[in-house]
Image (cartoon, rainbow, N blue to C red):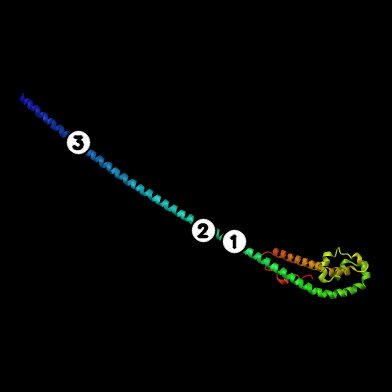
Amino acid sequence: MAKAKRAGAGEGRMHRGDAALLLRKRLEAAGKRHGAEMAEIAERAARQRRECSEEYAQVRERLDAAVAGHAAEEAAAKADRARAEEARKLARDKREAAQALRKAETTKKRKTCAIEAEQIREEARAQRRHAREVEDLERSILRKGASEARAERRHGERREDVEDDVPERLRPLWRRVGRTFKVPKRKEGRSSLLEAFLEFAEESPDAVAAAQEAEVQAEALRLQREERKRGAGRGRVRRADLPEAPF
């Protein structure tokens, strides 16, 4: 029995040694599989990291390109805005310069017309002074002739004929009052229409001057209106283009 027990104990030890060996082999095989799996996992992880890095690099490159394109577009837009502002400023400066030029030309024309009108009035006054001297002689001659033709004119005197005999200096006054002028009742039958008008003009120097001044001003206004109608660029009115004073 002792041998049997020893044999059974030996077999038990042998079986336990085989089991441990088998377990060890299984553990080694599991370790190898685990190592292979870990290596594969590590390789996949490394591959994924590389792919992510490449994708990140591509995304980063596209993002940088987009940022650069946006910056270029912003710079172009800023340049366009600067050019547009410069064009607006240039157009504004041109408009202001044109307005200033038109204003200066208008002022110059007004001054020129005013000076020419004053010159016309001064010439008219000089002509009136000269005409007064001539008229004194004409009046004496006319009175002599009028006294001889008084009877005939008293019956058939016409205003058109009287105007032909009126001195040039007094014609503005005649054109103003001649249509309604009549011989005063106190002189009817003793003075002709021409004689009565000459006496009226002699007694009313202010009326003569006012009629002459009115015609001069009317002529000056007419010239100014014609100058405005001709417009810019036609030049100033020359003295040779002005009509001579009517008296």
Residue at the image position 5 percent from the left and 25 percent from the top:
2
Relative depth, front residue between 66 and 131: 131
The dot on residue 126 is: none
Are the residues flagged by discs 3 and 1 in contact, CB closer than 8 Å? no
Residue on which disc 3 sits: 27
Among the two numbered marks 3 and 1 on one chain, the one whose residue lies closer to the N terminus: 3
Q: What residue is at 42 percent from the left and 53 percent from the top?
A: 68
Which of the two residues, 209 or 81, is positioned nearer the viewer here? 209
Query: The disc labelled 2 sits on which kind of residue?
Result: Arg
Q: Kindly identify the amino acid type of the residue bearing the numbered disc 3.
A: Leu
Q: Is residue 134 left or right of residue 150?
A: left
Query: Does residue 47 appear left or right of residue 171 in this picture?
Result: left
Q: Nearer the viewer, mark 2 or mark 3?
A: 2
Please state which of the two labelled residues, at mark 1 or mark 2, is closer to the viewer.
Answer: 1
The quadrant of the image that shows the C terminus is bottom right
Q: Dot 1 corresponds to which residue?
A: 96
